Image (cartoon, helix red, strand yellow):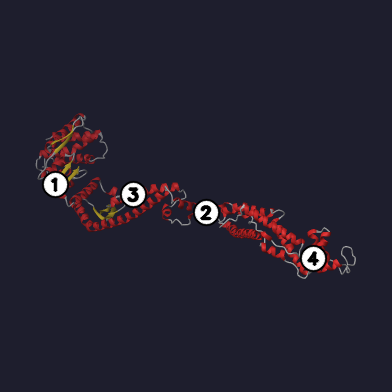
């Protein structure tokens, strides 16, 4: 189960990686896909994108923000205030006096400046002397009217009229051009400010509104000009009063909106020093990436990524549960398995055992970790080192093969269905000495009695003969292949094969010893491997039944030496040891190519031994 979950997890990871690639391609600003997928899309996303865009523009145009002045605001009172001034008069001044002064101004062509000129003269009269001609004016009626007319109350009224005229002149100019210039300048400035500021509403007036306001201001100005010419006359807005009041109210609202925007602009101006271009770009990219999640292809890929992430999390939980179950199972079985393996190793005569066996989940599949214990030292399996003892160096090839065989036999025996099993061994005697060969054959025969069938494949007829010798039921076959590559299976006899091998070995040894020639299909590597087995078979043939079938040349020599000088082979003990030592390294793969001279010398030595009997 762990393997299946691990496989599904890897497949999900591949799909997630492909999904991430699509997302990052569509949204280059996304670096952490997990955070991107899990991020909440705000309901006011469009507003945040616009705000982030303005912040970026603010950062990019910081110099312009500092240099650009605030929008223009003009001072203009409501239309009714101007009308109130136009209606004001002075109650104590008689209509006759008003008419006489008006006629006097007209007769002297002083027009609208007449009142100002006369008032100025009255104010600078010292006593009754005319400031212009220095004559006495005490008896002149019109001068007396002037003095009564141009009172402090009149001065206050004319000051109000003059202030209103100046205010209108500052806003209107000669033909409304000043007002239009202010609005036009603001329109231009707001095109810039709305890019860098979050202006709630950009102040604007339609062309029709502007023209209407200009017309209303013109009417107001004309009314105040008329009032200037006739300060004590009462004037009003007449039939256009409602329109003029409405126009100036619209302009006042425009002014209020400009002031509101000015506060926002001033705040932005103070903020510009702390705004960073890169951070603003990052924020804008973030919101744009979130917007991309709402549309294809990112929308589908985000959903797919989230689904895969959820499944991977579930797999982690399931794997953890399965691993814990496996650990529990191992805890209940591992001691028995470890003991069974160590018992087999002891039977094989191994000088080591396994220890510290436990479950491992490193890598793609669950496995078992263990150590090889040699004496008081424990070396972890798989551990390698150039300087310290390691699994690769402390065990010989035969030891490693024996350990693997012990694992295999223990695993087979642990199968509850062993009675129905067919067990196959492929060259199980590889790199084994006599004791281990005997134990291996014994274990194979035992498994044959426990299982349905045991099949042993080997190139070595001696080992096959060893299994056959004590087997209760055994059939031998040989797989052969002709020159055309056609294979077949036929009955085979280990005894006959061994006889043929013995004869072939004798011929090869004799030919090389006497003539220095290699017979067809024989090589130096093959010939050196023939020396010891041939000599062992010769000794057994010379003295049938004297030596156990599993005893090899070294032990045979020991027994012959122990028998003393009366033993027929005693005189060859030194030669037996020399041949055994010479051929030992080449009995397994990996030895060097034999020296031809040395090889021939050993062949001559064997030929001499054989010839003496």
Based on the displayed image, in which of its 4 quarters is residue 55 positioned? Answer: bottom right
Residue 98 got which mark? 4
Residue 223 seen in render: yes
Q: Residue 533 appears at what percent x and percent y?
A: 17, 39
Q: Residue at x 79, y 65 (%)?
A: 98
Return the residue found at the far right. 135
Q: Label 4's element?
A: helix
Most foreground residue, 437 or 42: 42
Q: Label 1's element?
A: loop
Q: Residue 517 appears at what percent x and percent y?
A: 21, 29
Most foreground residue, 268 or 112: 112
Q: Which residue is mark 3?
A: 10
- Give the side of residue 550 with respect to residue 389, left or right: left
Kindly report the distance in space between the C-alpha atoms of the residues bearing marks 3 and 4.
Answer: 106 Å
Residue 607 seen in render: no
Q: Residue 218 appears at what percent x and percent y?
A: 70, 56
Kindly report the distance in space between the C-alpha atoms of the residues bearing marks 3 and 2.
Answer: 41 Å
Q: Earlier in the sequence, mark 2 or mark 1?
A: 2
CB within 8 Å, label 4 to label 1? no
Mark 2 vs mark 1: give the one in front: 2
Query: Few, some or many C-alpha atoms within 10 Å of disc 1 (few <14, some 14-19, many ≥20)?
Result: some
Image mark count: 4
Look at the picture and state if 140 lies above or below 538.
below
Q: Which residue is mark 2?
A: 50
Kindly report the distance in space between the C-alpha atoms of the residues bearing marks 3 and 1.
Answer: 39 Å
Q: Which residue is mark 1?
A: 452
Based on the displayed image, in which of its 4 quarters is residue 94 positioned? Answer: bottom right
Q: Label 2's element?
A: helix
């Amino acid at each position: 189960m762990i393997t299946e979950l691990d496989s599904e997890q890897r497949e999900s990871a591949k799909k997630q990686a492909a999904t991430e690639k699509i997302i990052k391609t569509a949204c280059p600003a996304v670096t952490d896909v997990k955070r991107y997928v899990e991020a909440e899309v705000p309901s006011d996303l469009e507003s945040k994108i616009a705000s982030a865009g303005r912040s970026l523009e603010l950062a990019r145009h910081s110099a312009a923000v500092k240099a650009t002045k605030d929008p223009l605001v003009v001072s203009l009172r409501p239309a009714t205030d101007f009308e109130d001034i136009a209606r004001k008069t002075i109650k104590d001044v008689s209509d006759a006096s008003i008419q006489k002064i008006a006629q006097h101004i007209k007769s002297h062509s002083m027009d609208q400046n007449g009142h100002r000129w006369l008032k100025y003269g009255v104010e600078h009269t010292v006593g009754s002397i005319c400031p212009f001609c220095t004559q006495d004016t005490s008896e002149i009626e019109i001068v007396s009217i002037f003095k009564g007319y141009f009172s402090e109350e009149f001065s206050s009224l004319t000051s109000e009229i003059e202030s209103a005229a100046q205010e209108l002149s500052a806003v209107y100019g000669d033909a409304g051009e000043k007002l239009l210039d202010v609005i036009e300048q603001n329109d231009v400035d707001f095109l810039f400010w709305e890019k860098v500021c979050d202006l709630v509403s950009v102040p604007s007036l339609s062309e029709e509104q502007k023209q209407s306001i200009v017309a209303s201001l013109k009417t107001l100005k004309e009314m105040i000009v008329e009032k200037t010419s006739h300060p004590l006359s009462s004037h009003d807005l007449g039939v256009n009063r409602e329109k003029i009041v409405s126009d100036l109210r619209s302009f006042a609202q425009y002014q209020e909106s400009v002031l509101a925007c000015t506060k926002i602009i001033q705040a932005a101006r103070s903020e510009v020093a702390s705004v960073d271009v890169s951070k603003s770009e990052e924020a804008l990219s973030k919101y744009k990436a979130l917007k991309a999640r709402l549309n294809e292809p990112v929308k589908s890929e985000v959903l797919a990524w989230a689904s895969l992430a959820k499944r991977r999390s579930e797999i982690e939980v399931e794997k953890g549960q399965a691993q814990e179950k496996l650990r529990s199972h191992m805890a209940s079985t591992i001691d028995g398995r470890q003991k069974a393996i160590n018992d087999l190793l002891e039977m094989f005569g191994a000088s080591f055992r396994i220890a510290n066996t436990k479950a491992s989940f490193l890598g793609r599949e669950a496995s078992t970790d263990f150590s090889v214990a040699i004496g008081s030292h424990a070396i972890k399996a798989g551990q390698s080192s150039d300087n310290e003892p390691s699994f690769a160096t402390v065990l010989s090839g035969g030891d490693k093969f024996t350990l693997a065989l012990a694992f295999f036999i223990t695993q087979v025996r642990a199968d509850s269905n062993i009675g129905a099993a067919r067990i196959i061994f492929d060259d199980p005697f590889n790199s084994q000495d006599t004791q281990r060969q005997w134990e291996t054959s014994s274990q194979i025969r035992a498994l044959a009695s426990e299982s349905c069938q045991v099949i042993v494949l080997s190139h070595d007829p001696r080992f096959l003969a060893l299994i056959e010798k004590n087997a209760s039921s055994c059939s031998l076959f040989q797989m052969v292949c002709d020159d055309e590559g056609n294979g077949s299976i036929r009955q085979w006899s280990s005894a006959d094969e061994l006889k043929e091998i013995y004869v072939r070995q004798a011929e090869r040894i004799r030919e090389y010893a006497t003539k220095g020639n290699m017979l067809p299909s024989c090589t130096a590597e093959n010939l050196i491997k023939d020396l010891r087995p041939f000599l062992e078979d010769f000794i057994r043939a010379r003295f049938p039944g004297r030596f156990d079938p599993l005893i090899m040349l070294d032990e045979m020599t020991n027994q012959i030496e122990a028998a003393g000088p009366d033993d027929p082979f005693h005189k060859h003990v030194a030669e037996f040891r020399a041949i055994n030592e010479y051929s030992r390294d080449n009995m397994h793969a990996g030895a060097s190519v034999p020296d031809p001279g040395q090889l021939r010398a050993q062949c001559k030595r064997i030929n001499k031994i054989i010839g003496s009997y």
